[in-house]
Image: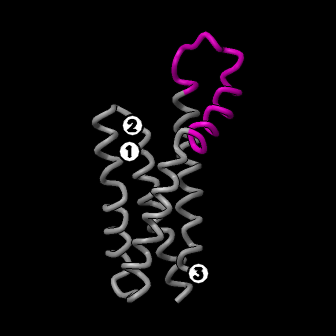
Amino acid sequence: MKILLSNWINVVGIIVTAYLYTFFWTFSKPSDFEGNRLMIWLFGSLFTIFGYGMMSWLLFVFAIVALDMLLIFPNRRKLTEKLLIEWLLIISPFIYWAFKYDYWLWIMLAASFLLTQLLRKRKIERIT
């Protein structure tokens, strides 16, 4: 159970990355909403993460939990390889969508997920 709870690292990493991406995206373009950029960033990020991306969030968390149960629970040997396989399986459709729809947030989220998987490895090793 503690292994499943270690997924909070992935969720926090994704949220932080989405906030930083939308911050730079919001403040990098000229806009008619000069005075409201901070509010657009704060509330737009929340909408992007929890409103627009809710189905993606649910599928993301379900995929992590399912792959943890299939790969990590039975045997924790070769943990790094298993976490990288998990990462590759989960991000593959998002990378495809990033190039298909020119939505580069997915690339940043994939990189963040890789980093958090490696951080999570340390946490799992301490659990076992």
Residue 127's place in the image compared with 115, above or below, is below
Cα–Cα span, label 1 and label 2: 5 Å
Magenta-colored segment: predominant secondary structure: helix
Q: Please state if 75 lies on the left or on the right of 116 as rendered.
A: left
Q: Is residue 72 above or below residue 100?
A: below
Where disc 3 sits, the SS reads helix
Question: Within the image, what quadrant is residue 35 found in?
Answer: top right
Q: Nearer the viewer, mark 2 or mark 3?
A: 3
Instruction: Provide the residue designation for mark 3.
Output: 2
Identify the secondary structure beneath mark 1.
Answer: helix
Q: Residue at x 38, y 79 (%)?
A: 70
Residue 6 bears which disc, if any? none
The segment highlighted magenta reads 26-51
Q: Is residue 92 left or right of residue 29?
A: left
What's the residue type where badge 3 is placed? Lys
Q: Looking at the rendering, in which quadrant would you find the N terminus?
A: bottom right
Residue 37 is one of the magenta-drawn residues: yes
Amino acid type of the residue that numbered disc 2 sits on in the rendered structure = Trp
Question: Considering only order in the chain, which callout, 1 or 3, is on the residue closer to the N terminus?
Answer: 3
* Residue 20 x/y as whole percent: 56, 40
Q: Where does label 1 land, which residue?
A: 107
Q: Tell me which residue sits at (42%, 64%) in the image.
A: 63
Tell me the SS state at disc 2.
loop
Q: Residues within 10 Å of mark 1 (few under 14, many from 20)?
A: some
Q: Is residue 79 left or right of residue 122?
A: left
Q: Mark 3 or mark 1: which is in front?
A: 3
Return the residue at label 2.
Answer: 104
Tell me which amino acid carries mark 1.
Ile
| Chain-order first, disc 2 or disc 3 | 3
Determine if the magenta segment contains residue 31.
yes
Instruction: Sort mark 3 into few (<14), some (14-19) or many (20+) by Cα contacts within 10 Å.
Output: few
